Amino acid sequence: AQAEAAPVDLSGYTRVKQELVAPPFAPKHEQVASGGPKIVEIELITEERLMVVDEDTGAEIWALTYNGSVPGPLIIVHEGDYIELTLRNPTDSQMEHNIDFHASTGALGGGGLTHVFPGEETVLRWKATKPGCFTYHCAPGGAMIPYHVTHGMNGAIMVLPRDGLKDGEGNPLRYDSIAYIGEQDYYLPMDENGDYRTYELAGDDYADSMDAMRTLVPTHSVFNGAVGALTGDNALRAKVGETVLMIHNQANRDSRPHLIGGHGNYVWETGSFTDAPLTGIESWFVRGGSAMAAMYTFEQPGVYAYVNHNLIEAVLLGATAHFVVDGAWDNALMEQVVAPRSFET
Amino acid sequence: AQAEAAPVDLSGYTRVKQELVAPPFAPKHEQVASGGPKIVEIELITEERLMVVDEDTGAEIWALTYNGSVPGPLIIVHEGDYIELTLRNPTDSQMEHNIDFHASTGALGGGGLTHVFPGEETVLRWKATKPGCFTYHCAPGGAMIPYHVTHGMNGAIMVLPRDGLKDGEGNPLRYDSIAYIGEQDYYLPMDENGDYRTYELAGDDYADSMDAMRTLVPTHSVFNGAVGALTGDNALRAKVGETVLMIHNQANRDSRPHLIGGHGNYVWETGSFTDAPLTGIESWFVRGGSAMAAMYTFEQPGVYAYVNHNLIEAVLLGATAHFVVDGAWDNALMEQVVAPRSFET
Amino acid sequence: AQAEAAPVDLSGYTRVKQELVAPPFAPKHEQVASGGPKIVEIELITEERLMVVDEDTGAEIWALTYNGSVPGPLIIVHEGDYIELTLRNPTDSQMEHNIDFHASTGALGGGGLTHVFPGEETVLRWKATKPGCFTYHCAPGGAMIPYHVTHGMNGAIMVLPRDGLKDGEGNPLRYDSIAYIGEQDYYLPMDENGDYRTYELAGDDYADSMDAMRTLVPTHSVFNGAVGALTGDNALRAKVGETVLMIHNQANRDSRPHLIGGHGNYVWETGSFTDAPLTGIESWFVRGGSAMAAMYTFEQPGVYAYVNHNLIEAVLLGATAHFVVDGAWDNALMEQVVAPRSFET
Ligand SMILES: [Cu+2]
Ligand SMILES: [Cu+2]
Ligand SMILES: [Cu+2]
Ligand SMILES: [Cu+2]
Ligand SMILES: [Cu+2]
Ligand SMILES: [Cu+2]
Ligand SMILES: [Mg+2]
Ligand SMILES: [Mg+2]
Ligand SMILES: [Mg+2]
Ligand SMILES: [Mg+2]
Ligand SMILES: [Mg+2]
Ligand SMILES: [Mg+2]
Ligand SMILES: [Mg+2]
Ligand SMILES: [Mg+2]
Ligand SMILES: [Mg+2]
């Protein structure tokens, strides 16, 4: 069918290159599109790399990645734009990879047209017809699908409405920064002593991973690839009065983010921008296999923890990030009237 | 209370019989109701049958079913209609059964009025006052409730608004076909070697099933009763330009369907038709214990996989169906610009 | 930052004391606020107590509670009110506690300002700026966060709009009673025989609890602290024609409530009152780490079970409550046309 398809007329489109950057950051982009629709060229390299998941236990994984990071880089376009992807699998890879864009239409989201073996490249162009945040991920077929996805091979694209984000009444919503957070469930095999196994090459953990995945209970659920990747020196930063758009990607497993000390002022819980955002939310829900967005304007300084509010997953499995927010405290919102003190019994 | 209740006047109602059919098909029905409200007569037989769950492993279950299928047949009526059910438990059954319709009001959804032992029948009439898709299931009491439900004894009813489905602005939405998909979590007991146990009679696995269920981790999560029931020769079929209404029933456990290569154009995520559908959704959420509906118009030919997008559940546990869609490829939506080829290093 | 913050002017506010009561009951309150905004004084005592979780198995836990109950008491204020909390940790406690209000803004929801060791008290005042139902819980830091939360240390606050609840068109919605239900997932350690372990003091189960929590599979998921706390003599009561507001708190783990034989006529699924309620819902979804509300007007007498509709969790893990509803049966809604009888084969 594809061989006989009519050629597409791209004469009205401008070509631009989008330089992808590592998470939690977002590529340069306009919130409101200027000019007509574009062909946005991006490049993804399938990189297999040994990553430390948790320095405390030494747990590590032969991560399967796009461009070396878990999650893969955030892509941002506007509705009506084309994405023209070059996907390249390095010669020294062990495995076949491809990519399925939930934002696209047909051919298994492009998965059917992008299988690249080590040493191969391919180019796929598709039109972003639906505004929203969407997952992309590797899906080489059969049991390799959950294997690649739970080894980190997933990320998100945001397709903005051409005139930008809006609230339920059509008023524009703008953000000062994006925090791009990928939650990754890992199923790391253990030996009989409960120690995490190590493997020489990417793919060597395949059989053991199958057993671990079948429990449906991850050993880790981390933000941006590893325990602590977004805390301490790597914490996210903002100022009182600033608005952050938190983009949460979870390509496999449900999550329920909560910003401790804050809220989701506007939450596109399914990721779709054609529906009005939810408002005033304490904990929102990420359907496994989706990317979504929540917007918050900080009102107080201090540390905010952004967690998967299954608190076992937040603390024992790793799903915690920190925002450090500067500014002046507002006693009208909260005040410690009496600091902790002994009381007379 | 019921013995003293005033008789109901049914003089304004027409009687019709609905011939139920096996999933994934839908009974003959009107999308917009013609004429006044009806009494829709249906018949359900509680059939206990040994079913193969997965041919590869030989896993089997003494399924508890309505009319022999997992899920039970789809029922379709309009808001304001009565359902008049004859429920019959064959003489050679091992167990007591009943039925709880989430769409109904009172008496535990009818569960309290329909307990039939082997060799018994009963007739229940109830009014469909709430439009939407709703689960029905067996609920004989105590631990038998999850036991019967996780042995396949559940299905869905769709209560259409009399004037049919609508989008958020009140415009009519029509479908060309229905794909009725029941997702079933099974908890199959294994022996010490990890092989699935076999049992002589329905109910013999009761004690072992209790242990397996308590883990909350299913051994299988399948569409329409068995691994592969909706793939290969049994794949669903459609054409480019056709609109399919996917009705997803999950009587026990959450799910997150995704149509690989497509979307949910209109998604009634809770199943209620009194709320506007969500639009432009990548992965939607089925609350355990509910039936829901998602509508999609195919834009490209090819194979689409409909999965529970916990990809471990989709691939390792069985939650995968296929749509095979005929038609002409549209390069304006997606094009393979460069087929996979070696690149110069 | 807080030391230098400008003082807040509270001259326009009236002070009132709210007497908190044990669940499933609600404190005295107005549905529509009369007069201007208030400072609502409440008192919470952190009580560590040995509780029986399941009389059948003898399973028990050193529960960590607010005011002795699991969940902690329901607090009700109106948008714009201040909550002024005195939090007191008795001298004979084993552990440090604090409180994080999801409804509040800043300082980790107050968690950063309320750490009280045994023998200490503190006072925190914060403004309820977002209407909705919200979780509160203990969050002393690190692994103690899920430990305290899964030992019962959580509850809910409802922040009503000043002019009360409304449907999606702005019409007032009023309730006759509140049923306040806290769902609690416990992870009780077992010995090698599968018997629940006992411990001498609160906190002694810490290491074993960590192992149990890491499975992510609770041994119990109960309403109001223990199996059967809301059934039998403790069942909730209502009359046909009465409207109940069911407030469901789950501070850690997802749930999917369903009222067997009834519905959610109006469901604020995320708990937010700034979004229109869902309507006509069979099973709704509680995001782990949230409180929410569902409203139903009973139309038939009889027993209604309110369950987590993962029926394994409802029946085997304990998540079942009962409503006993008095009134006259309505054959127009449902009628047993033929009682179970033998049929001719
Ligand atoms: Cu891959
Ligand atoms: Cu996918
Ligand atoms: Cu049954
Ligand atoms: Cu049910
Ligand atoms: Cu505590
Ligand atoms: Cu919290
Ligand atoms: Mg499309
Ligand atoms: Mg392949
Ligand atoms: Mg999305
Ligand atoms: Mg009703
Ligand atoms: Mg019975
Ligand atoms: Mg439904
Ligand atoms: Mg705020
Ligand atoms: Mg501390
Ligand atoms: Mg809430």
Image (cartoon, coloured by chain):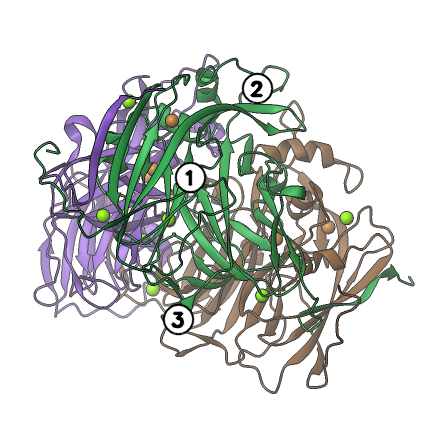
Chain colours: A green, B purple, C brown
Give how far apart the Cα atoms at labels 3 and 2 are: 52 Å
Chain where mark 1 sits: A
For the residues carrying marks 2 and 1, which lies nearer the camera in this image? 1
Helix, strand or loop for disc 1: strand
Q: Nearer the viewer, residue A85 or C26?
A: A85
The answer to whether marks 1 and 3 mark residues whose Cβ atoms lie closer than 8 Å is no
Q: Amino acid at mark 1?
A: Gly
Asked if one can make out residue B229 in the rendered structure from this viewpoint, the answer is: no
The correct choice, above or below, for B92 with respect to B89 in the image is above
What residue sits 62% from the left and 19% below the top? A195
Task: Choose mark 3 or mark 2, whichever is in front.
Answer: 3
Which numbered disc, 3 or 2, marks the residue that appears first in the sequence?
A: 3
Read off the residue under disc 3: A171
Q: Which residue is mark 1?
A: A155
- Is C307 drawn above or below residue A209 in the view shown? below
Picture coordinates of residue B147, whole percent (x, y): 40, 35
Query: Same subunit under labels 2 and 1?
Result: yes
To which quarter of the image does residue B171 belong?
bottom left
- The x, y position of residue B205, in whole percent, is 40, 25
Determine which of the numbered discs, if any, sits on residue A190 in the image.
2
Cα–Cα gap, marks 2 and 1: 27 Å
Q: Quadrant of the C terminus of chain C?
A: top left
- Dot label at residue A224: none
Disc 2 secondary structure class: loop
